[in-house]
Image (tube, rainbow, N blue to C red):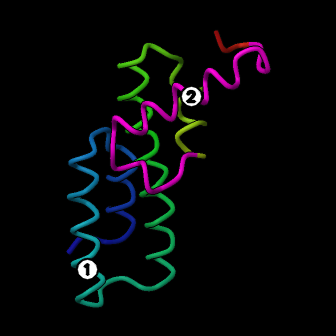
């Protein structure tokens, strides 16, 4: 079993959702076997959502041809329930960009 620090270092380098889910499965197995503590579980969840938001935002930003940093901030604020449906998340992001247009100087 990987040490917690090694797992976190590898997770921060992930740029693919499938790899992220594989890391989550590995961590879940470690939790079930008692290799990781509750504090480590909290830290894992924080890193997991940061990486997942980044991966989703990069993928969608390329698809809709928008600034990745703008899309990351919108994805972070999106409801968790739509983050597993790429089409619904894309519609949400486009809607937020249209709503923010004119209120924020950098969005076009």
Q: Residue at x 38, y 54 (%)?
A: 9
In depth, the one of 86 and 57 nearer the eye is 86
Q: Which mark, residue 30?
A: 1
- Please tell me whether the stretch drawn in magenta is mainly helix, strand or loop: helix
Q: For the C terminus, which image quadrant?
A: top right
Residue 102, above or below 53: above
- 21 vs 53, left or right, is left
| Residue 95 numbered mark, or none | 2
- In the rendered structure, are the residues bearing label 1 and label 2 in contact, judged by CB atoms less than 8 Å apart? no
**Residue 68 coordinates in the image, percent (x, y):** 50, 24
Label 1's element?
helix
Residue lying at 51% horizontally and 80% vertically, measured from the top left: 39
Q: For the residue labelled by badge 2, is the local secondary structure a helix, a strand or a loop?
A: helix
In magenta, the rendered stretch is 78-105
Tell me what residue is drawn at x 20 percent, y 58 percent.
22
Q: In x, y percent, where is residue 32? A: 25, 87
In the image, 92 versus 66, the foreground residue is 92
Disc 1 versus disc 2: nearer the observer: 2
Rate crowding at label 1 as few (under 14), some (14 to 19) or many (20 or more) other CA atoms within 10 Å: some
Q: Quadrant of residue 41?
A: bottom left
Task: Give the farthest residue toward the bottom.
Answer: 34
Query: The N terminus appears in which quarter of the rendering?
Result: bottom left
- Verify whether residue 96 appears in magenta: yes
């Amino acid at each position: 079993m990987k040490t917690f620090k090694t797992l976190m270092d590898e997770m921060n380098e992930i740029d693919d959702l499938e790899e992220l889910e594989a890391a989550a499965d590995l961590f879940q197995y470690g939790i079930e076997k008692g290799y990781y503590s509750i504090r480590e579980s909290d830290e894992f969840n924080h890193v997991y959502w940061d990486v997942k938001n980044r991966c989703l935002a990069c993928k969608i930003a390329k698809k809709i041809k928008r600034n990745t940093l703008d899309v990351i901030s919108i994805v972070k604020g999106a409801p968790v329930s739509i983050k597993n449906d790429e089409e619904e998340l894309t519609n949400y992001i486009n809607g937020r960009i249209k709503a923010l247009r004119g209120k924020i100087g950098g969005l076009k």
